[in-house]
Image (spheres, grey):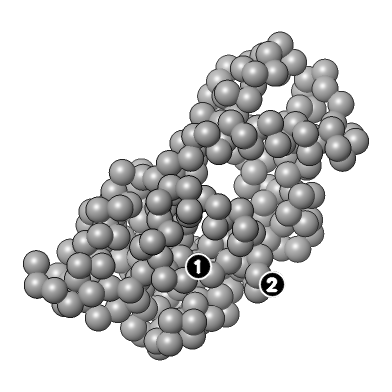
């Protein structure tokens, strides 16, 4: 590959784009349930994981909207999850302890997607500058970035928790471009959520890339992507060829 053939800033989403969030959550909640034993032993693993995932979506979205603070969304997830079982987490300290025990198991499971580091290395070799825009708390997201070995490769991390606005608000994408000192037309944004990430970025003037890891995009999603000029890839291995091809 020629060097410096990619004159762009390439910004990434963190969870489920570079960082294997769902896999870590699945392992984490399974280990936590095993550790606390009979109290949450009912039902099947897939069902409980799906329930935990949907509670995360529900209450994390409320946090991003400003309806709950960061601790509040954790407490709400813990309380709703144990509601079918004989556990009382009404007390904030009890809810925090339950969530912290889950968090310890989740953190033990932290890992990157296998295609993340090869992709970043190839972009860097091609002259790309690399950053992250994430909807979350800067301290929590930074601890993930450091632990999984991303930190040396990332020039700047932009977190919604610091700014008061979150993806898909165009301000967060434009803020990231300003931090890098580039115009949006010289920046790319790659994420696993079509609307929040790829179309949001495209609406702010960046090149949006949707990472559809499952390959499950339907016709209307592909039409929305095309209408916004969003590139669709199924693996980060496809990113550099798609940008330079
Ligand atoms: Mg994501």
Q: Nearer the viewer, mark 2 or mark 1?
A: 1
Q: Which mark is residue 1?
A: none
Inspect this view and state whether residue 91 appears: yes
The Cα atoms of the two marked residues, 2 and 1, are separated by 15 Å
Inspect this view and state whether residue 189 appears: no
The structure residue drawn at horizontal position 70% and vertical position 36%, both measured from the top left corner, is 100
The structure residue drawn at horizontal position 62% and vertical position 17%, both measured from the top left corner, is 34
Q: Where 203 sits versus 119, above or below? A: below
Question: What element does badge 1 sit on?
Answer: strand
Q: Which mark is residue 164?
A: 2
Q: Which residue is most to the top? A: 38
Q: What quarter of the picture does the C terminus occupy?
A: bottom left
How packed mark 2 is, by other alpha carbons closer than 10 Å (few <14, some 14-19, many 20 or more), is: few
Q: Which residue is most to the left? A: 1
Question: What element does badge 2 sit on?
Answer: loop
Q: Which comes before the other along the chain, label 2 or label 1?
A: 1
Q: Which mark is residue 157?
A: 1
The structure residue drawn at horizontal position 79% and vertical position 38%, both measured from the top left corner, is 96
Q: Where 185 sits versus 168, above or below? A: below
Q: Is residue 139 left or right of residue 244?
A: right
The picture places residue 192, in percent across and down from the top left corner, at 43, 55
């Amino acid at each position: 590959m020629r060097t410096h053939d990619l004159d762009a800033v390439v910004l990434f989403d963190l969870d489920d784009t570079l960082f294997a969030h769902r896999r870590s959550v699945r392992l984490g909640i399974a280990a936590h349930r095993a550790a606390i034993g009979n109290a949450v032993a009912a039902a099947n693993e897939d069902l409980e994981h799906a329930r935990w995932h949907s509670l995360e979506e529900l209450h994390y979205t409320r946090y991003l909207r400003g309806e709950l603070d960061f601790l509040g969304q954790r407490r709400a997830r813990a309380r709703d999850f144990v509601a079918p079982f004989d556990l009382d987490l009404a007390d904030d300290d009890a809810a925090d302890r339950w969530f912290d025990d889950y968090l310890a198991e989740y953190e033990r499971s932290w890992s990157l997607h296998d295609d993340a580091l090869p992709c970043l290395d190839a972009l860097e070799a091609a002259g790309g500058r690399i950053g992250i825009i994430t909807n979350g708390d800067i301290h929590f997201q930074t601890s993930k970035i450091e632990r999984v070995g991303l930190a040396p490769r990332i020039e700047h991390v932009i977190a919604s928790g610091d700014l008061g606005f979150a993806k898909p608000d165009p301000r967060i994408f434009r803020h990231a471009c300003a931090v890098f000192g580039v115009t949006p037309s010289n920046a790319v944004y790659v994420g696993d959520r079509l609307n929040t990430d790829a179309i949001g970025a495209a609406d702010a003037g960046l090149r949006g890339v949707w990472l559809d890891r499952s390959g499950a995009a339907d016709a209307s999603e592909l039409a929305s992507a095309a209408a916004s000029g969003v590139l669709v890839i199924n693996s980060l291995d496809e990113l550099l060829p798609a940008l330079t091809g």
